[in-house]
Amino acid sequence: MNSYVDLADYLQGEGIKSYMQNPDLIVISNNYPALPSSNCFWAALRDNVWYVGTWLPAVYQVPAETNVGVVCKRVYESSSRAIYSIDADLATNLRLRELDEQEMERLGFAN
Protein backbone atom coordinates (compact mmCIF):
# COMPACT_ATOMS: atom_id res chain seq x y z
CA MET A 1 0.00 0.00 0.00
CA ASN A 2 1.60 3.26 -1.01
CA SER A 3 -1.03 5.95 -0.55
CA TYR A 4 -3.59 7.26 1.92
CA VAL A 5 -6.31 6.49 -0.64
CA ASP A 6 -5.22 2.83 -0.78
CA LEU A 7 -5.23 2.62 3.02
CA ALA A 8 -8.64 4.30 3.35
CA ASP A 9 -10.11 2.00 0.68
CA TYR A 10 -8.72 -1.09 2.40
CA LEU A 11 -10.07 -0.01 5.79
CA GLN A 12 -13.47 0.85 4.32
CA GLY A 13 -13.61 -2.65 2.87
CA GLU A 14 -13.02 -3.96 6.39
CA GLY A 15 -15.82 -1.79 7.81
CA ILE A 16 -13.44 0.72 9.42
CA LYS A 17 -13.77 4.43 8.70
CA SER A 18 -11.01 6.99 8.41
CA TYR A 19 -10.49 10.63 7.54
CA MET A 20 -7.60 12.90 6.69
CA GLN A 21 -6.59 15.06 9.67
CA ASN A 22 -4.20 16.96 7.41
CA PRO A 23 -2.52 16.22 4.06
CA ASP A 24 -0.08 13.75 5.60
CA LEU A 25 -1.98 12.14 8.49
CA ILE A 26 -4.98 9.82 8.37
CA VAL A 27 -7.09 9.16 11.47
CA ILE A 28 -8.56 5.69 11.82
CA SER A 29 -11.86 5.99 13.68
CA ASN A 30 -15.53 5.25 13.13
CA ASN A 31 -16.27 8.65 14.72
CA TYR A 32 -15.74 12.07 13.18
CA PRO A 33 -14.21 13.87 14.82
CA ALA A 34 -12.39 11.23 16.84
CA LEU A 35 -12.81 11.69 20.58
CA PRO A 36 -10.96 10.13 23.53
CA SER A 37 -14.02 7.98 24.17
CA SER A 38 -13.89 6.60 20.61
CA ASN A 39 -11.61 3.97 19.15
CA CYS A 40 -9.02 5.97 17.26
CA PHE A 41 -5.37 6.28 16.29
CA TRP A 42 -3.53 7.58 13.22
CA ALA A 43 -1.20 6.56 10.40
CA ALA A 44 1.27 8.57 8.34
CA LEU A 45 3.49 7.94 5.34
CA ARG A 46 6.96 9.51 5.40
CA ASP A 47 9.58 8.80 2.71
CA ASN A 48 7.68 5.66 1.61
CA VAL A 49 7.62 4.29 5.17
CA TRP A 50 4.37 3.85 7.08
CA TYR A 51 4.02 4.79 10.75
CA VAL A 52 1.14 4.14 13.12
CA GLY A 53 0.71 6.55 15.99
CA THR A 54 -1.28 6.83 19.16
CA TRP A 55 -2.37 9.73 21.32
CA LEU A 56 0.31 9.31 24.01
CA PRO A 57 2.01 9.99 21.56
CA ALA A 58 3.69 6.72 20.73
CA VAL A 59 4.76 6.12 17.13
CA TYR A 60 5.60 2.78 15.58
CA GLN A 61 7.33 2.05 12.29
CA VAL A 62 5.58 -0.52 10.12
CA PRO A 63 8.01 -2.94 8.41
CA ALA A 64 8.21 -2.38 4.64
CA GLU A 65 7.06 -5.92 3.87
CA THR A 66 3.99 -5.61 6.13
CA ASN A 67 0.58 -4.51 4.86
CA VAL A 68 -0.21 -1.29 6.75
CA GLY A 69 -3.92 -1.95 6.24
CA VAL A 70 -3.66 -5.23 8.14
CA VAL A 71 -1.68 -3.48 10.88
CA CYS A 72 -4.33 -0.77 11.20
CA LYS A 73 -7.14 -3.34 11.25
CA ARG A 74 -5.43 -5.36 14.01
CA VAL A 75 -4.67 -2.26 16.08
CA TYR A 76 -8.24 -0.99 15.63
CA GLU A 77 -9.65 -4.33 16.74
CA SER A 78 -7.45 -4.29 19.86
CA SER A 79 -9.42 -1.56 21.66
CA SER A 80 -12.84 0.03 21.93
CA ARG A 81 -11.44 3.41 23.04
CA ALA A 82 -8.76 5.87 21.98
CA ILE A 83 -5.45 4.05 21.75
CA TYR A 84 -2.66 5.63 23.78
CA SER A 85 -0.11 2.91 23.11
CA ILE A 86 -0.16 -0.37 21.24
CA ASP A 87 -0.13 -3.47 23.41
CA ALA A 88 3.45 -4.80 23.58
CA ASP A 89 2.43 -8.32 22.49
CA LEU A 90 0.52 -6.96 19.50
CA ALA A 91 3.40 -4.66 18.54
CA THR A 92 5.79 -7.63 18.71
CA ASN A 93 3.44 -9.83 16.70
CA LEU A 94 3.13 -7.16 14.00
CA ARG A 95 6.90 -6.46 14.15
CA LEU A 96 6.30 -2.78 14.89
CA ARG A 97 9.25 -0.75 16.13
CA GLU A 98 8.49 2.07 18.56
CA LEU A 99 10.31 5.29 17.72
CA ASP A 100 12.24 7.24 20.31
CA GLU A 101 11.64 10.97 20.89
CA GLN A 102 14.47 12.06 18.59
CA GLU A 103 13.08 9.98 15.72
CA MET A 104 9.59 11.35 16.35
CA GLU A 105 10.92 14.92 16.25
CA ARG A 106 12.95 14.32 13.08
CA LEU A 107 9.86 12.93 11.32
CA GLY A 108 7.58 15.71 12.58
CA PHE A 109 5.53 13.58 15.00
CA ALA A 110 6.55 15.25 18.27
CA ASN A 111 4.11 17.51 20.08
Image: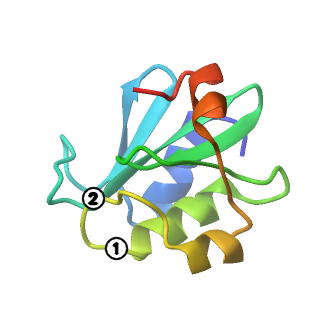
Determine whether, in the image, residue 105 is placed left or right of residue 16: right
Q: According to the image, label 2 marks what residue?
A: 82
Q: Please tell me the numbered disc located at residue 61.
A: none
- Give residue 67's position: percent from left, percent from top: 72, 59
Determine whether, in the image, residue 3 is placed left or right of residue 25: right
- Give residue 25's position: percent from left, percent from top: 47, 31
- Give residue 47's position: percent from left, percent from top: 76, 25
Binning the other alpha carbons within 10 Å of mark 1 as few (below 14), some (14 to 19) or many (20 upward) gives some
Q: According to the image, label 1 marks what residue?
A: 79
The answer to which image quadrant residue 92 occupies is: bottom right
The answer to which image quadrant residue 39 occupies is: bottom left
SS at badge 1: loop
Task: Name above or below for residue 81 compared with residue 56.
Answer: below
Q: Residue at the spot x=63%, y=29% of the render?
A: 102
SS at badge 2: loop
Kindly identify the amino acid type of the residue bearing the numbered disc 2.
Ala
Dots 2, 1 in contact, CB < 8 A:
yes
Q: Residue at the spot x=56%, y=73% of the render?
A: 88
Q: Residue at the spot x=62%, y=65% of the render?
A: 70
- Give residue 95's position: percent from left, percent from top: 74, 66
Q: Residue at the spot x=53%, y=72% of the render?
A: 74
Point out the image quarter for the C terminus. top left
User: Looking at the image, which is closer to me, 39 or 4?
Assistant: 39
Kindly identify the amino acid type of the residue bearing the numbered disc 1.
Ser
The answer to which image quadrant residue 89 occupies is: bottom right
Q: CA distance from mark 2 to mark 1?
A: 7 Å
Residue at far right of view: 65
Binning the other alpha carbons within 10 Å of mark 2 as few (below 14), some (14 to 19) or many (20 upward) gives some
